[in-house]
Amino acid sequence: MKTIEIDEVRRLSLLYPEVHEHVDGFGHISFRVKDKPFVIIGEALSIKTLPSTQEILLEQPGYTKAPYIGRHGWVLVEIEEVGWQTIEGLIRNGYLIVAPKRLLDTVRMRG
């Protein structure tokens, strides 16, 4: 991914409470809340979704099932295909899936 794209994903991911950035031994960047990832940047952008949402997304252009973690609802997203507004919504939903319940109301009240 391009640096400018990584910076934008970082900005969108860090908007949420208690999110931290983690870089693993392979250089993959993930954004986590309570050590649960909801966005992973490796060679591509992966975002956590519900399995039912994943099924719908996989029928559209710009999405593929993420290798290894796809069985848990993760999708690879092609930024150019889906656009930043969609990515922003996917990141928000990914956060809401993994965040502790005490943080959910804070995020939902922000709209």
Image: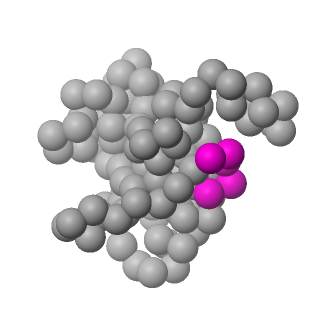
Looking at the image, which residue is at 36% across and 22% down? Answer: 51
Instruction: Judge from the rendering whether residue 52 lies leftward or rightward of residue 64; answer left or right.
Output: right
Residue 104 position in % (x across, y down)? 68, 28
Instruction: Classify 19 as above or below 84.
Output: above
Q: Nearer the viewer, residue 80 or 16?
A: 16
Residue 100 placement: quadrant: top right
Looking at the image, which residue is at 41% across and 79% down? Answer: 2
Where's the N terminus, which quadrant? bottom left
Can you name the residue that lies furthest to the bottom here?
Answer: 3
Instruction: Judge from the rendering whether residue 82 lies leftward or rightward of residue 16; answer left or right.
Output: left
Instruction: Judge from the rendering whether residue 65 lies leftward or rightward of residue 95; answer left or right.
Output: left
Instruction: Classify 2 as above or below 31.
Output: below
Instruction: Judge from the rendering whether residue 104 lies leftward or rightward of residue 80; answer left or right.
Output: right
Is residue 8 visible in the rendered structure shown here?
A: yes
Looking at the image, which residue is at 63% across and 22% down? Answer: 101
Residue 98 position in % (x across, y down)? 49, 31
Which SS does the magenta portion mostly show? Answer: loop
Please name the colour scheme applied to the rendered image: one colour
Magenta highlight range: 14-18
Is residue 56 visible in the rendered structure shown here?
A: no
